[in-house]
Amino acid sequence: MKLTKDTKILIVGLGLIGGSYAMALTKQGYKVRAITTSQKSIDYAVEHNLIESGTITPDPQLISDSDLIIFALYPHTFLEWMEQNGQNISKGTLITDVTGVKLPIIYKIESLLPEGIEFIAAHPMAGREVYGVENATDEIFKDANYIVTPTENNSPQAIEVCEQLGRVLGFASVSKLSPEEHDDMIGFLSQLTHCIAIALMTCNDSPHLENYTGDSFRDLTRIAKINYAMWSELFILNKKNLIKHMEKFELEFTKLKQALQNDDIATMRKIMRKSTERRSRFDKYPCDN
Amino acid sequence: MKLTKDTKILIVGLGLIGGSYAMALTKQGYKVRAITTSQKSIDYAVEHNLIESGTITPDPQLISDSDLIIFALYPHTFLEWMEQNGQNISKGTLITDVTGVKLPIIYKIESLLPEGIEFIAAHPMAGREVYGVENATDEIFKDANYIVTPTENNSPQAIEVCEQLGRVLGFASVSKLSPEEHDDMIGFLSQLTHCIAIALMTCNDSPHLENYTGDSFRDLTRIAKINYAMWSELFILNKKNLIKHMEKFELEFTKLKQALQNDDIATMRKIMRKSTERRSRFDKYPCDN
């Protein structure tokens, strides 16, 4: 298949991400339909021109009449849905997803697919600290990365369509990683940072700290407001990578603590110089200075 | 003394904070002079209307002709300066500072003061990841907290002038804490967050991570760009508090790691729910959602 304005796109799961995909695609003139569990979400999405139409039942006719199906579900729901409804997907249909971990999902989904249907996985690294289609906005893609994670089973055509989807959605950058590289990277850049924010937010019960806090503390804990159902699932699915990164972080943190404990100012400054140099490479805007 | 437009204000140390104080005060119509170690900084500050005049020598006449002296120096430089030049301060002069830790500084400074001179300590919780008077801007005070940390030796008048100074500088909030409370709070809200950012930034040497990073990682590591000379000094001065908070954080981080290790999803979610609830209390703007 190719992605054109005539492509029949079906989004399964109209939450924050599914809804934001719908908004971006509809704005660009694509035809979007949806399946989700809540009638309220369908009503909202139709009313706000995010989708043409939608249903809360996994209508076999709607499923089979789709060229591109985008799954924006929790990992376990994605697997369940595919077990129950995968047989209704038509030959030639391309399916993709938004799941935050890749290796534990991709091969399971591939094993559930009927003949002639290709799954090309992708991870939109975008989000907000609120949920639901009511908070959907394509603004979240503007500064974000979209990562396609092909396997040896993917065709160049499918990879190309998936990359095109990332560009149509308006992502600042579209790139490719193997599922293994992706899960390692996400374990560090996203999951470890959430663990840190959570631990920082919960390790001090003193009242009224919020009266004195500056922007640095707010920045570090913004993501401590977390969709715990989803993130706990993602953490467990990526357990090996995440534990590895947690341990590397602990080691470095302890090194700094011991230098402080020993009044070893030379080591402290060495670590700080390294962090200053490394952080410079991550600057996005001049104003990050 | 009272803070009026005729008050002769002397700023000692024209770096980022001293320069930003100078800018805010001069804009409000106060008369500001300065002593700092670099002629370039003096020239810049005069040229950009931050100060009326300044000198790189600790001119006894200028010092004695000041009603309010603001010290914007590193802690050890502040102590050295006072040892060498304290005797030139006139009776009735009020002195204040911007030092990031309080208990280890205040009583030492008080012990160095000649009779009839009062020191009222304050901490402007503002900053940037760049240094020097060339980067000075009163914008940094707008959303920030100004904390006065009086001791039993301070007069109500001095406390009132210091609070007035915080308001004149344009801080969003002016409050009072004991030096002990301040150092405990700052050990958690500011110093621990810097340690975390540093360790996160230095614990992974993989190349090209910056190509995939999202805003959450950038937010957590913004402060990993650090003035290591100043911060290592502040960390050591507040060692007891900082180590205590580092250990509390490690404990909580390990709790989360062990829950993950044991696939204990109930405990993970309990910790995440707590972090979500606590973080809500720190929201500054509706858009923090």
Image (tube, coloured by chain):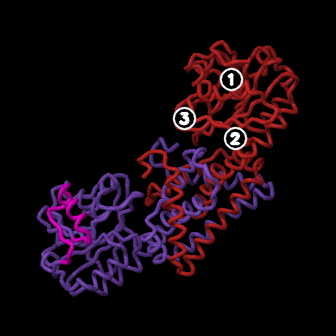
Chain colours: A red, B purple
Where residue A200 sits, quadrant-wise, is bottom right
The residue that disc 2 covers is: A177
> Residue visible at 41% across and 47% down?
A287
Q: Is residue B81 above or below residue A282?
A: below
* Label placed on residue A172: 3
The residue that disc 1 covers is: A39
Q: Circle 1 — which element?
A: helix
Amino acid beneath label 1: Gln
Amino acid beneath label 3: Ala
Stretch in magenta: B35-58
Locate residue B167 relative to residue A204 in the image: left or right. left
Q: Are marks 2 and 1 in contact (CB under 8 Å)?
A: no
Q: Are marks 3 and 1 in contact (CB under 8 Å)?
A: no
Q: Is residue B132 above or below residue A108?
A: below
Amino acid beneath label 2: Leu
Q: Magenta span has B42?
A: yes
- Of circles 2 and 3, the one toward us is 2
Q: Position of residue B249 (x, y in %)?
A: 61, 66
Q: Is residue B32 visible?
A: yes
> Residue visible at 68% across and 23% down?
A39
